[in-house]
Image: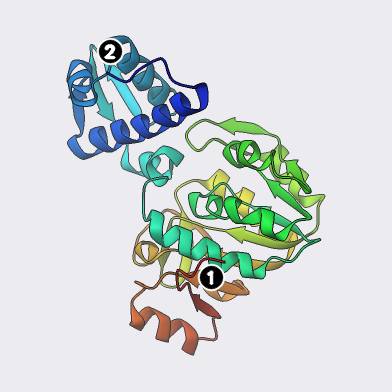
Amino acid sequence: MLSEEVPSDSRQARQIVRRQLIAETVIAEGQIRIEDLTERFGISLMTAHRDVDELVSRGIFTKTRGIVSAAPTNLIESSDVYRATRQAKEKRAIAATAMRYVEPGQAIFLDDSTTVQQMVPLIPSKVPLTAITNSLVLMNELKGIRDLTVLGLGGRLHNWCNAFMGPTTTAEIRQLRADTAFISMSAITDDIVFHQSPEMVETKRAMVESAARRILLMDHTKFGRRALHRFAALSEFDVVIVDEDTDIADLSRLRAAGVTVVVADGRPD
């Protein structure tokens, strides 16, 4: 079993990783008994129930009579627990490239995406900055950075993505004017960006409309995927950053259409 006699920050890190792995397991298998989770992850029944209850509260699982089941696919794929473990290497490369568009003294919008989250470790190299975000995760990660002003956007907190969204959030965004908005979304179909959540679309749309420059961060798995709600055409962004595994046909088509596409090379800055 996981030891309880570890520093609190280490225990929290283990908890986050464990819950991500539990989410992966249930998503892959569809449903599983809680008792099986205790055996598979070497944890107590109490810990298993606590982890599962947290994921249930986020809308990722349902729990009935000791059986844990995955929620509908579109909600799972939008959740930060699910997204955090996807294409991590590609996201780091894209984030490093995105930081080349940040200059000291700027104000930047950072959305709640796990790709944009990968920019956080690199931000100290570009301070002083003002970072504006609706992500509760980013607020907590950014607050300890010296010479960084963090503007946290309020509103209704959505547990499934750990982010604030809704009319209050968009109203706050529209009162601001930033230099650059860094955005990532769920899907690209017919060279148009989509997302499963209409609230997410409206929040991120407010960000790009309130920024002088719009930069989209998308790994190769987003091409050809489908989501319900339209956000924007790729041509509406000043820069689209993708990873090295993006299909050459997609790159050629976009560049021929006048879209500025930058391929992240994975080089750390």
Residue 148 coordinates in the image, percent (x, y)? 76, 48
Residue 192 coordinates in the image, percent (x, y)? 47, 68
Residue at left 58%, top 58%? 183
**In the rendering, which numbered label is found on residue 190?**
none
Q: Is residue 185 above or below residue 262?
A: above
Using residue 103 as the reference point, say whether residue 263 is left or right of it: left
Residue type at tag 1: Ala
Disc 1 from disc 2: Cα separation: 49 Å
Using residue 259 as the reference point, say whether residue 13 is left or right of it: left
Who is closer to the viewer here, 243 or 178?
A: 243
* Mark with earlier residue (1, 2): 2
Q: Is residue 27 above or below residue 33?
A: below
Residue at left 51%, top 78%? 261
Question: Do we see residue 188 in this rendering?
Answer: yes
Given this view, does label 1 or label 2 mark the residue nearer the observer? Answer: 2
Residue type at tag 2: Ser
Question: Do we see residue 232 in this rendering?
Answer: no
Residue at left 78%, top 61%? 106
Using residue 185 as the reference point, say whether residue 29 is left or right of it: left
Who is closer to the viewer here, 18 or 201?
A: 18
Image quarter in which the N terminus is found: top left
Residue 29 coordinates in the image, percent (x, y)? 18, 35
Mark 2: few, some, or many residues within 10 Å (few <14, many ≥20)? some
Image quarter in which the C terminus is found: bottom right
Residue at left 44%, top 55%? 186
Residue placed furthest toward the bottom: 256
Q: Which residue is mark 1?
A: 233
Task: Tell me which colouring the rendered structure shows.
Answer: rainbow
Q: Which residue is mark 2?
A: 44
Q: Are marks 1 and 2 in contact (CB under 8 Å)?
A: no
Give the secondary structure at mark 2: loop
Residue 16 coordinates in the image, percent (x, y)? 42, 31
